[in-house]
């Protein structure tokens, strides 16, 4: 094992296809100081594990640049106070550059600022502030920030450049195409050949349109890599080069006129990349929405005054003012005011949640109608929103095992296509005696039509969009492997307490003898008010919920877990089990014994209440089911999954709950540490198991399961607790997570099918296999158009996932989808 390992995420621009991603991976993995490198084509990121004692981020960036690509950096200018000389500037520069993730820091003593270039995945503004202050100087804030829109600006500039190039290419090539097709009167009378005129007209256009392709191809060849740019450069280069040779009669005749073809090919290739880049930009919209939730400023009470400060200036224990319509700046607790807060952007729950003093709020959520005073508890990268963004980013960069199929195919694809193109040329020209013109056309068509881009985009675009959609619905999927395994599940195991049930007992039945039910609840609550037992709390909660006035009690006594007593309004009240009351001289009729036994048969605890010397009634208490439990279990069974319940309860209680929800496979009396063994036993029988638990008490079972599904409780969610984390405490979301996983995997397979089918169908067509039978050939221009459409089709199919609503949530979540659309 390495002594030290760090992980960095680099945002990369300039990738066009899967071979570009593989090229960058190979370049990074070729370094001795890099342990692993994974490139996500859809998210345009590279995740690198490296040894910081041997290399730096700047060295990794140079490796990417040498491969012909660019790393997107964030830049910020920070105002600094307290500098008096050049040595001060050097100290600050050294302090900033010591941060792992800062590429460059330049301090200007005259203007008293520092320009910092950094990797936002590793360095935050609080880190930069701490470095400045740690060096002994004042951090005065941001002068101007250019980081947030750098990536968007680069994408827009790239799109505009591609747009200009393909428009110019088509403006020249389309008229020439029709000239070659239809001819033009009077051309024969010109003193120079038509080919020479076409050379003069097309040369500057060809160089302008195809320059990025040739530059990228040259960079790839310098790194001894074969990319799509190499193939495209060969295709359009052969077309234009043959035309030039034909024009001047060198080896070839003037019949070899591919000028308009070469320009049109370059234009189509650029158009394809333009459309692909536009579509790819939309795949990461979910993460952009999450990032957009972060407020930039906060209103803080300082020295009794309300002051608006940048969000990075908020510190723990600051008291913030959040007005109606404003976003909550950071995670905290309400210390004043009442309001409703819209948490749908975090939890997927459409109904605003009432907040009052003592309730927790989450940064990025929307205050709807009242003024709140909030004490900051978590800031920066510790906030729930920051954790969700980090999880979604990591997940979108992960690879499900199915992607290995595409990786293997892409690694062999380009050499195979070059072999096929060369073989087709030789077979037609040498073997079948076709003209050199026809054979060259076949060669060019094959080089242009072949496209592994669709293969390379099939999986990452679907994973990126699918995981982003899950985050919008409150389903946090930690990696692509969880997606793939969830699709293959055969069994779902539920913990009972807190998962199937609410996790706290409630009074379900009140049976009074000789007094009103309200009176029975009042005297029982008066006694139980003094107890800390969960069953006692259930009685008090029921009385308060019914609006019953609870009288005072005195002389409260407990009897070793068997029962309690107290004096209420001058009369002794006893509460406890049947033996306890009999022991205290209270008669329990056989009919009452039968009612208590009947309650036990359905998983309820029968508590007897006596007032004075008479039995006053029975309170049935149980840990009640969550409202959506029955529907969720039924949905899973309809999906063909085996449903199992594990609980530490006795068999009678466990079976009662199981019967109510429709579960037949029950494992009762299981200790918490034994739950993982139960999961392992199912796996040894060949089952692919998901375990659904609370993420805290069930950690070993969640880890043992093939997929651990941790149920959260709204915004108080344990992000690290499972392979899939459900933000809401709702079992319907467990069903929805499996449905979403199946949908994403289905879309990946659909994408891979179309990508393979496209190449399997069009490469033989371009090679001319139908020409001897039907006289059908594939013009290079149309081959280029088909190539462009293949990638766009795959990305567009993935983008359809943005509007997907799992069947389990349809009808009940139509409002939430307005956030995701």
Image (cartoon, rainbow, N blue to C red):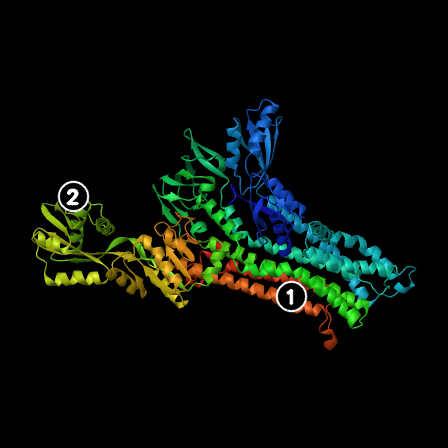
Q: Which residue is drawn at 79% across and 69% down?
A: 429
Q: Where is residue 343 in the image (x, y as percent from the top left)?
A: 42, 49
Q: Residue at x 60, y 22 (%)?
A: 85
Residue 759, label in figure? 1
Say few, some or many: other residues with alpha carbon within 10 Å of mark 2 (under 14 / 14 to 19 / 20 or more). some
Q: Is residue 616 left or right of residue 537?
A: left
Total marks placed: 2
Query: What element does badge 2 sit on?
Result: loop
Which is more toward the observer, 454 or 707?
A: 707
* Extreme residue in the bottom direction: 773
* Extreme residue in the front direction: 1
Circle 2 sits on which residue?
552
Circles 1 and 2 in contact, beta carbons < 8 Å:
no
In the image, residue 202 above or below residue 294: below
Q: Where is residue 110 in the image (x, y as percent from the top left)?
A: 62, 26
Say few, some or many: other residues with alpha carbon within 10 Å of mark 1 (under 14 / 14 to 19 / 20 or more). some
| Mark with earlier residue (1, 2) | 2
Q: In this view, does 327 lie to the left or right of 24?
A: left
Q: Position of residue 212 (x, y in %)?
A: 71, 51
Residue 675, label in figure? none
Q: In this view, does 265 lie to the left or right of 364?
A: right
In the image, residue 361 above or below residue 767: above
Instruction: Work out how far the residue at label 1 is from the one at label 2, CA to CA, in angstroms.
Output: 82 Å
| Residue 805 can be seen in this image | no
Q: Is residue 452 left or right of residue 181?
A: left
| Residue 276 can be seen in this image | yes
Which is more toward the observer, 89 or 198?
A: 89
Q: Which residue is drawn at 55% across and 24% down?
A: 82
Q: Which of marks 1 and 2 is in front?
A: 1
Q: Where is residue 434 in the image (x, y as percent from the top left)?
A: 80, 71
């Amino acid at each position: 094992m390495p002594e030290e390992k760090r992980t960095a995420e680099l945002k990369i621009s300039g990738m066009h296809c899967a071979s570009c991603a593989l090229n960058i991976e190979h370049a990074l993995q070729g370094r001795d100081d890099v342990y692993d490198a994974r490139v996500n084509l859809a998210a345009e990121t590279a995740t690198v594990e490296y040894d910081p004692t041997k290399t730096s981020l700047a060295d990794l960036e140079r490796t990417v640049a040498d491969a012909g690509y660019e790393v997107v950096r964030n830049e910020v200018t920070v105002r600094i106070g307290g500098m008096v000389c050049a040595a001060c500037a050097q100290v600050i520069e050294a302090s900033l550059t010591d941060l792992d993730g800062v590429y460059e820091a330049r301090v200007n003593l005259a203007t008293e600022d520092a320009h910092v270039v950094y990797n936002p995945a590793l360095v935050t503004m609080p880190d930069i502030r701490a470095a400045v202050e740690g060096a002994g100087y004042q951090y005065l804030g941001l002068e101007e920030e250019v980081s947030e829109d750098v990536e968007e600006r680069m994408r827009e500039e790239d799109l505009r450049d591609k747009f200009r190039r393909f428009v110019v290419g088509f403006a020249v090539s389309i008229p020439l195409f029709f000239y070659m097709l239809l001819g033009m009167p009077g051309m024969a009378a010109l003193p120079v050949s038509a080919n020479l005129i076409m050379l003069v007209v097309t040369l500057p256009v060809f160089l302008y349109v195809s320059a990025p392709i040739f530059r990228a191809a040259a960079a790839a060849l310098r790194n001894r890599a074969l990319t799509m740019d190499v193939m495209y450069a060969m295709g359009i280069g052969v077309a234009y080069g043959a035309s030039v040779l034909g024009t001047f009669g060198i080896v070839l005749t003037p019949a070899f006129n591919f000028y308009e073809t070469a320009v049109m090919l370059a234009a189509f290739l650029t158009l394809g990349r333009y459309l692909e880049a536009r579509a790819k930009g939309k795949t990461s919209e979910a993460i952009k929405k999450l990032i957009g939730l972060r407020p930039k400023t906060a209103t803080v009470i300082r020295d009794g005054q309300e002051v608006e400060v940048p969000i990075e200036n908020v510190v723990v224990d600051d008291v913030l003012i959040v007005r109606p319509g404003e976003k909550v700046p950071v995670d905290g607790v309400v210390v004043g005011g009442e309001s409703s807060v819209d948490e749908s952007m975090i939890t997927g729950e459409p109904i605003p949640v009432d907040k009052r003093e003592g309730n927790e709020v989450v940064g990025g959520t929307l205050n709807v109608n009242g003024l709140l005073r909030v004490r900051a508890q978590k800031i920066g990268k510790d906030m729930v929103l920051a954790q969700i963004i980090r999880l979604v980013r990591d997940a979108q960069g992960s690879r499900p095992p199915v992607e290995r199929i595409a990786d293997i195919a892409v690694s062999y694809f380009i050499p195979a296509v070059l072999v096929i193109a060369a073989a087709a040329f030789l077979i037609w020209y040498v073997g079948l005696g076709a003209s050199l013109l026809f054979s060259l056309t076949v060669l060019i068509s094959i080089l242009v039509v072949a496209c592994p881009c669709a293969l390379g985009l099939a999986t990452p675009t679907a994973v990126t969009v699918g995981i982003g959609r899950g985050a919008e619905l409150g389903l946090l999927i930690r990696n692509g492997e969880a997606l793939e395994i969830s699709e293959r599940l055969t069994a779902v195991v539920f913990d009972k307490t807190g998962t199937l049930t609410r996790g706290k007992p409630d009074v379900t039945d009140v049976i009074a003898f000789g007094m009103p039910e309200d009176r029975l609840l009042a005297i029982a609550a008066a006694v139980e008010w003094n107890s800390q037992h969960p069953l006692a709390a259930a009685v008090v909660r029921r009385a308060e919920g019914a609006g019953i006035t609870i009288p005072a009690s005195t002389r409260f006594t407990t009897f070793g877990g068997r029962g309690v007593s107290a004096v209420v309004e001058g009369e002794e009240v006893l509460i406890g089990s049947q033996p306890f009351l009999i022991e205290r001289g209270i008669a329990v009729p056989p009919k009452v014994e039968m009612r208590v036994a009947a309650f036990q048969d359905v998983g309820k605890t029968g508590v007897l209440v006596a007032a004075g010397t008479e039995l006053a009634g029975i309170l049935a208490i149980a840990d009640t089911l969550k409202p959506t439990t029955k529907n969720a279990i039924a949905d899973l069974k309809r999906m063909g999954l085996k449903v199992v319940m594990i609980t530490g309860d006795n068999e009678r209680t466990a079976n009662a709950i199981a019967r109510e929800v429709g579960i037949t496979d029950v494992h009762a009396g299981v200790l918490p540490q034994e739950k993982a063994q139960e999961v392992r036993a199912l796996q040894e029988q060949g089952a692919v198991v998901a375990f659904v638990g609370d993420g805290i008490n069930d950690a070993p079972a969640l880890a043992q399961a093939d997929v651990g599904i941790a149920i959260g409780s709204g915004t108080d969610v344990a992000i690290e607790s499972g392979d899939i984390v459900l933000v809401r405490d709702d079992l319907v979301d467990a069903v929805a997570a499996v449905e979403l996983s199946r949908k994403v995997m289905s879309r990946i397979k659909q994408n891979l099918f179309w990508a393979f089918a496209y190449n399997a169908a069009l490469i033989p067509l371009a090679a001319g296999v139908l020409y001897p039978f039907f006289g059908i050939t594939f013009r290079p221009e149309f081959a280029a158009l088909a190539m462009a459409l293949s990638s766009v089709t795959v990305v567009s199919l993935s983008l359809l996932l943005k509007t997907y609503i799992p069947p389990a949530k349809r009808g009940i979540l139509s409002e939430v989808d307005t956030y995701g659309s």
